[in-house]
């Protein structure tokens, strides 16, 4: 059932202190918590033949599909009766788009006993344009899942597999319709991924693999191949972003590496040379390289490498004017992201964060767009925080003491001016020249004190006026920005 709390409690029970039981419990706990390095460490001390499966499973959990594929192939001399290891080999093979050597060996779907074996078989058949065979293989897989769905412990896994099979069937049908000239491929690749959870690694990997298989099947159609290339790259970006969001850093790193390799191979294969860099154009490499760098920066930030992420995103901003009115959605996202990170780390003063990042992003965002809502919300939230901080300073003991001192200084200035006027009147009516000279000297010193007090009182008034104006500006800008979010 994957109950990590129960497994952790059982690990403290004396019943499980025996070596074999404690190791099995340690591996189960590592799987339940998604702690794949711990699973690798626990598998390292095993002596039986199942250690190959546990090691491969740990590598798979870290998102290292190509490493699992190479490792599992090197175990061909090991016990092939271990069904779990055989299935892991098949899974790593289709995740790495290695299906060209399987369909020639199988004449009918279902000869292979496992889900991943038949899934890989269906992918190979689609790549070879055997649409009927691919659909038969998928139907066989679906029927087997329907038979297993009653097992409660496999419920979530089987639902994920059903979603992957349904998505694969749609792609196979779309490829068939594209070959017949009906052209339903574009609508399909633009559709969202079917997922039981927000991020289902199996379903995301399946969508990418089936898009690659469809690209192989339609390789002689330039327009379809270009569309599928873009769909594959968009799916990889989505995988990297969702894996980063859910803390699957190994899967995110692997996805970014796959995209980098794909773009490099595509550029070499197409003899690619872009005369004009337009990151808004999804048919150009600049667009995907930009999105790849942005996903990489998000991954670095989420994994705690903040300085590298900040350098990466600052480098992306060096090629354009952040105050330009012609910023596209990705540039606006970079501005908004940079401003948010600067807020979190407090690495810049508030005026710089607002004027250089958040305000340009909100100002240039297109109306009624998701990026506009994000930009306005980031600006509104930050300015609202500044407003609350300013209000808090007004209500603090330090500010109240400053106000008391300012009021006393104002009173002192008024008293000095009144005393000066009285002295001047006394000097005017005085007949004794000696006393008159003494009072005039006193008045002169008093004028100096009054000038000094006037400067201090003016500074107090300016400081208070600036603080009040800032509060009004913060409140107004926060209300406008948050209103634009819901407008």
Image (cartoon, rainbow, N blue to C red):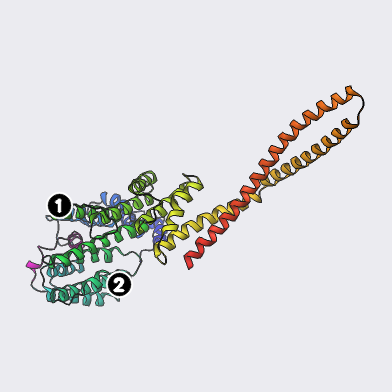
Q: What stretch is highlighted in magenta?
A: 83-106
Is 239 on the left-hand or right-hand side of 110?
right
Q: Report helix, strand or loop for mark 2.
A: helix
Q: Which of marks 2 and 1 is in front?
A: 1
- Please tell me how crowded label 1 is: few (under 14), some (14-19), or many (20+) other residues with Cα within 10 Å: few
Task: Using the image as rendered, state which of residue 366 and residue 404 is in the foreground.
Answer: 366
**Residues under labels 2 and 1: Cα distance?**
40 Å
Above or below — where is 473 with respect to 163? above
Residue designated by label 1:
268
Task: Using the image as rendered, state which of residue 161 and residue 274 is in the foreground.
Answer: 274
Residue designated by label 2:
159
Task: State yes or no: residue 104 in magenta.
Answer: yes
Q: Is residue 109 visible?
A: no
Above or below — where is 186 with respect to 244? below
Q: So how many labels did they put on this image?
A: 2
Could you tell me which quadrant the N terminus lies in? bottom left
Could you say where residue 203 lies in the image, as x and y percent from the top left? 27, 66
Task: Using the image as rendered, state which of residue 115 and residue 308 is in the foreground.
Answer: 308
Q: Which residue is drawn at 46% across and 60% down?
A: 376
Farthest residue toward the top?
434
Task: Using the image as rendered, state which of residue 232 and residue 13 is in the foreground.
Answer: 232
Task: State yes or no: residue 353 in magenta.
Answer: no
Location of residue 255 by image quarter: bottom left
Q: Report helix, strand or loop for mark 1.
A: helix
């Amino acid at each position: 059932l994957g109950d990590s709390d129960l497994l952790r409690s059982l690990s403290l029970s004396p019943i499980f202190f025996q070596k074999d039981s404690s190791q099995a419990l340690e591996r189960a706990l590592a799987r339940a918590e998604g702690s794949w390095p711990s699973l690798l460490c626990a598998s390292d001390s095993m002596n039986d033949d199942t250690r190959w499966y546990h090691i491969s499973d740990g590598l798979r959990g870290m998102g290292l599909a190509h490493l699992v594929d190479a490792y599992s192939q090197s175990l061909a001399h090991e016990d092939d009766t271990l069904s779990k290891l055989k299935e892991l080999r098949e899974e790593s093979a289709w995740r790495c788009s290695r299906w060209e050597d399987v369909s020639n060996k199988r004449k009918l779907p279902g000869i292979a006993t496992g889900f991943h074996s038949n899934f890989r078989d269906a992918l190979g058949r689609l790549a070879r344009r055997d649409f009927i065979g691919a659909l038969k293989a998928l139907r066989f897989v679906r029927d087997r899942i329907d038979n297993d769905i009653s097992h409660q412990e496999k419920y979530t896994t089987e639902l994920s597999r059903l979603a992957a099979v349904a998505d694969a069937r749609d792609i196979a049908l779309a490829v068939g319709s594209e070959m017949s000239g009906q052209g339903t491929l574009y609508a399909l690749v633009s559709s969202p991924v079917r997922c039981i959870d927000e991020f289902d690694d199996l379903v995301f990997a399946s969508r990418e693999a089936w898009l690659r298989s469809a690209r192989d099947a339609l390789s002689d159609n330039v327009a379809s191949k270009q569309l599928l290339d873009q769909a594959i790259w968009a799916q990889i970006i989505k995988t990297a972003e969702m894996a980063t969001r859910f803390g699957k850093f190994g899967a995110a790193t692997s996805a970014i590496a796959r995209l980098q390799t794909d773009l490099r191979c595509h550029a070499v294969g197409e003899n690619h040379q872009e005369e004009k860099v337009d990151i808004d154009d999804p048919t150009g490499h600049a667009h995907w390289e930009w999105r790849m760098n942005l996903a990489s920066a998000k991954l670095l930030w989420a994994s705690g490498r903040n300085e590298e992420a900040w350098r990466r995103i600052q480098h992306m901003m060096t090629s354009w004017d952040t105050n330009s009115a012609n910023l596209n959605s990705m540039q606006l996202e970079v501005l908004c992201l940079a401003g948010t990170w600067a807020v979190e780390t407090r690495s810049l003063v508030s005026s710089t964060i607002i004027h250089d990042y958040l305000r340009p992003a909100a100002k240039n965002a297109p109306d009624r767009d998701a990026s506009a809502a994000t930009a306005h919300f980031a600006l509104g939230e930050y300015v609202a925080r500044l407003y609350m901080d300013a209000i808090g300073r007004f209500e603090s003991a330090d500010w109240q003491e400053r106000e008391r001192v300012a009021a006393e200084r104002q009173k002192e200035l008024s008293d000095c001016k009144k005393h000066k006027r009285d002295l001047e009147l006394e000097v005017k009516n005085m007949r004794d020249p000696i006393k008159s000279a003494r009072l005039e000297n006193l008045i002169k010193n008093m004028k100096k004190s009054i000038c000094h007090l006037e400067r201090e009182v003016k500074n107090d008034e300016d400081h208070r006026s600036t603080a009040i104006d800032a509060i009004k500006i913060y409140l107004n800008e926060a209300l406008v920005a948050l209103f634009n979010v819901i407008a």
